[in-house]
Image: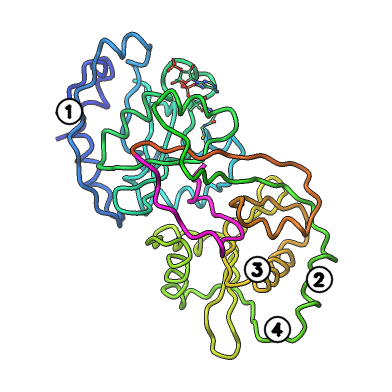
């Protein structure tokens, strides 16, 4: 049966609970590449009175469709976040049921949001953006509320960009305790400082090899990444391995996997999209080598837990921001931080 909701926009404001669920299930049947299993939750009836009141009745939230990915990405990209179209595409392809859009009756994507699963029933909310011309009409609130009714969850958490704090507080989110905010630093790296640190390592550096990621070692890569984060990060790790520059550190003596760095260029800056390492020395070697991969610039964007800002010493900070972390439904499960030198965008999923 065709999806009549899409062809009869005038009826959207009167959509019933059953119709919402039907749409969700149909889209799941089409999503053949999906690797995550979800428990469908019935959508609570939407109160039409509220929708009329806040002016969002003309918008409809549902899972993203394949041909909307680029449109949604373009909205997100305007915010300048750490995402490339290739990465967004791959994430949507592998987890189409984690990505949502709000569309107008004409099918225009007006906003988007996604959820990355960490622990059981625990998700990071990310990529929440409403098209600039459609803000302040209650749509951001609607996207979050409607999509959260579409899947089972207990804890939802996120890092809020400066200025969005009040928006989340209004939705009932609370600052996480302990607050695990992220510090963003754009630095101009002084390569001599990095080299100096490498030299100071002496022989210790000789036992570490740094090499490009090899697809044959994907499973080992995923195991290491998941171990570092404390939760199963298979999908995200395989996406990173597939579309960013990834370097892997191993101990030469026993071939042990001891760290990796992932990065890409965006807006003439190297965006570190994850740097995990067993020690400061290994982190330094990975950092040095990733700089070599992008000789066109020494400007680097770092995003770190406040507890580990080791990499900042290698550059002059040209811009700095602090992102606060909020959660709904309880505090998120703490993740290990000591070996995380730079988070990846799934840690904050902007
Ligand atoms: C944040 C964003 C998604 C909010 O969407 P929106 O449609 O404008 O928000 P709404 O109209 O639903 O606002 C809901 C509530 O939050 C408030 N609010 C929204 N944006 C706010 C802001 N920047 N500062 C303070 N309050 C804000 C509204 O006043 C409203 O309050 P109320 O519920 O008491 O009436 C949107 O502004 C946006 O896309 N911003 C750029 C991307 C971004 O920052 N995303 C968040 C990443 S963490």
Check contact, mark 2 vs mark 1: CB within 8 A: no
Q: Residue at x 53, y 36 (%)?
A: 160
Q: Residues within 10 Å of mark 1 (few under 14, many from 20)?
A: some
Instruction: Determine whether the beta carbon of the residue marked 2 sits less than 8 angstroms from the nearest atom of ligand 1.
Output: no
**Labels 3, 1: front one:** 3
Indicate which disc residue 30 carries: none
Describe the element under mark 2 as helix, strand or loop. Answer: helix
In the image, 126 versus 30, the foreground residue is: 126
Characterize the local packing of mark 4: few (<14), some (14-19) or many (20 or more) Cα atoms within 10 angstroms. few
- Disc with the residue nearer the chain's start (3 vs 2): 2
Instruction: Of the two numbered discs 3 and 1 on the same chain, state the one appearing first in sequence.
Output: 1
Q: Which residue is mark 2?
A: 195
- Pick whichever of labels 4 and 3 is earlier in the sequence: 4
From the image, tell me which residue sits under label 4.
Answer: 204
Is residue 316 toward the left or the right of residue 8 in the image? right
Q: Nearer the viewer, residue 104 or 142?
A: 142
**Marks 4 and 2 in Cβ contact (< 8 Å):** no
Q: Tell me whether the residue at label 4 lies in contact with that at label 3, contact meaning CB atoms closer than 8 angstroms.
A: no
**In the depicted view, which residue is nearer to us: 62 or 41?**
41
Could you say where residue 315 lies in the image, as x and y percent from the top left? Answer: 79, 55
Separation (CA) of disc 4 from disc 2: 14 Å
Q: Is residue 289 above or below residue 56?
A: below
Q: Which residue is mark 3?
A: 283
Q: Which residues are magenta?
A: 330-350
Q: CA distance from mark 4 to mark 3?
A: 13 Å
Specify which label sits upstream in the sequence, 4 or 1: 1
For mark 1, what is the residue?
Answer: 19
Residue 293, placed above or below residue 272: below
- What residue is drawn where x is 69% and y is 66%? 287
Asked if the magenta segment contains residue 336, the reply would be yes
């Amino acid at each position: 049966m065709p999806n009549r909701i899409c062809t009869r926009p005038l009826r959207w404001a009167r959509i019933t609970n059953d119709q919402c669920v039907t749409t969700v299930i149909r889209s799941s049947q089409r999503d053949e590449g999906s690797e995550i299993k979800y428990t469908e939750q019935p959508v609570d009836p939407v109160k039409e009175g509220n929708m009329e009141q806040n002016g969002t009745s003309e918008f409809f939230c549902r899972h993203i469709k394949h041909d909307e990915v680029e449109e949604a990405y373009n909205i997100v990209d305007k915010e300048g976040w750490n995402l490339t179209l290739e990465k967004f595409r791959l994430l949507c392809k592998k987890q189409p049921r984690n990505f949502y859009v709000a569309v107008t009756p004409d099918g225009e994507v007006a906003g988007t949001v996604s959820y990355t699963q960490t622990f059981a029933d625990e998700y990071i909310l990310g990529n929440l953006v409403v098209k600039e011309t459609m803000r302040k009409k209650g749509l951001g609130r609607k996207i979050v509320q409607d999509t959260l009714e579409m899947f089972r969850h207990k804890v939802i958490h996120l890092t809020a960009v400066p200025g969005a704090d009040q928006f989340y507080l209004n939705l009932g989110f609370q600052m996480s305790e302990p607050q695990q905010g992220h510090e963003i630093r754009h630095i101009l790296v002084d390569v001599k400082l990095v080299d100096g640190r490498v030299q100071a390592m002496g022989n210790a550096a000789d036992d570490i090899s740094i090499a490009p990621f090899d697809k044959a070692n994907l499973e080992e890569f995923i195991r290491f990444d998941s171990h570092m984060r404390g939760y199963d990060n298979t999908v995200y790790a395989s996406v990173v391995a597939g579309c960013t520059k990834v370097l892997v550190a191993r101990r030469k003596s026993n071939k042990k996997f001891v760290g990796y760095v992932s990065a890409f260029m965006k807006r003439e800056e190297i965006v570190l999209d994850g740097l995990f390492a067993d020690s400061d020395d290994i982190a330094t070697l990975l950092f040095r080598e990733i700089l070599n991969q992008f000789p066109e610039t020494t400007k680097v964007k770092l995003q770190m837990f406040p507890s580990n800002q080791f990499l900042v010493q290698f550059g002059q900070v040209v811009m700095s921001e602090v992102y606060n972390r909020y959660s709904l439904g309880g505090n998120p499960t703490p993740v290990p931080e000591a070996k995380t030198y730079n988070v990846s965008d799934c840690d904050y999923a902007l």
